[in-house]
Image (tube, rainbow, N blue to C red):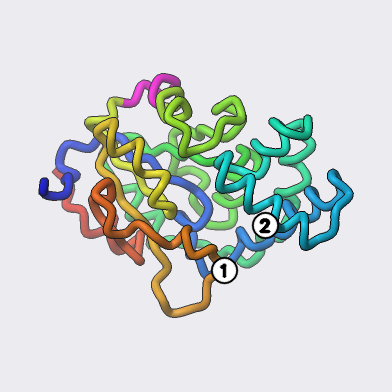
Amino acid sequence: MNPPRAFTHVDTWVFDLDNTLYPHHVNLWQQVDARIGEFVCNWLNVSPEEARHIQKDYYRRFGTTMRGMMTLHGVRADDYLAYVHKIDHSPLEPNPALGAAIAKLPGRKLILTNGSVDHVGAVLARLGLATHFDGVFDIIAAEFEPKPAPQTYRKFLGDHAVDPARAAMFEDLARNLTVPHELGMTTVLVVPDGTKEVVREDWELEGRDAAHVDHVTDDLAGFLAGLSPH
């Protein structure tokens, strides 16, 4: 078995947003999740219970519920994104330790998310990280094809001129690290720290022992701070 990839060669640092740059237990995504359920319920005129089933089924099959709703029901992405991201961001608190750790990383810092750029902006503003990133690749830039679709990663690499062999990817879903690892990126899975309850599907918390996961951390700021600069 190959040893986990290191960071000494990395000059591009790629971060997922939700449940990666802020702790799982904030459960901000729970608000989005509830809004998605409402959208599905209203659009398809089904019960909340049936909407929940459809929502999770599409999430697993298409990568996002939105992709399933667009593909099967003709939903417009703009309408969907505006609705589901209308949430209360106040549970997020500034994280100066994470900001300092990101600032010290050598090279570019980018965000690759299945959310919208508006959602990214709101989250980073609350975290105090708005000035720490050099670019955002959101679901619109991905032409609404979410991670873990291989073409989404390839489009991201092309749009931002990223050499995957010199990049690291930080994610909270192990399945979203499969393609980055295949492409040559160093991969890091960010997991809950275990101190507070998190609202996740069982499968979302799997994969920390997978071969495509080089590193696992429950403290992103501490992990980044521990990476010695070259």
Q: Is residue 87 magenta?
A: no
For this rendering, which residue is in front, 94 or 204?
204
Q: Secondary structure at mark 1?
A: loop
Q: Residue at x 55, y 28 (%)?
A: 142
Q: Residue at x 25, y 42 (%)?
A: 186
Q: Residues within 10 Å of mark 1 (few under 14, many from 20)?
A: few
For this rendering, which residue is in front, 119 or 84?
84
Compared across the picture, whether 29 is left or right of 216 comes to: right
Q: Position of residue 22 (x, y in %)?
A: 49, 60
Q: Secondary structure at mark 2?
A: helix
Asked whether the residues under the numbered discs 1 and 2 touch, taking CB atoms below 8 Å apart as contact, a structural biologist would say yes
Q: Which residue is mark 1?
A: 199
Compared across the picture, whether 41 is left or right of 213 comes to: right
Q: Is residue 158 magenta?
A: yes
Q: Amino acid at mark 1?
A: Val
For this rendering, which residue is in front, 181 or 115?
181
Q: Position of residue 6 (x, y in %)?
A: 16, 46
Q: Residues within 10 Å of mark 2 (few under 14, many from 20)?
A: some
**Where are the magenta residues, as a range?**
157-162
Q: Which residue is mark 2?
A: 33
For residue 82, which quarter of the picture? top right
Q: Amino acid at mark 2?
A: Asp
Residue 118 shows in this picture: yes
Q: Is residue 149 above or below residue 87?
A: above
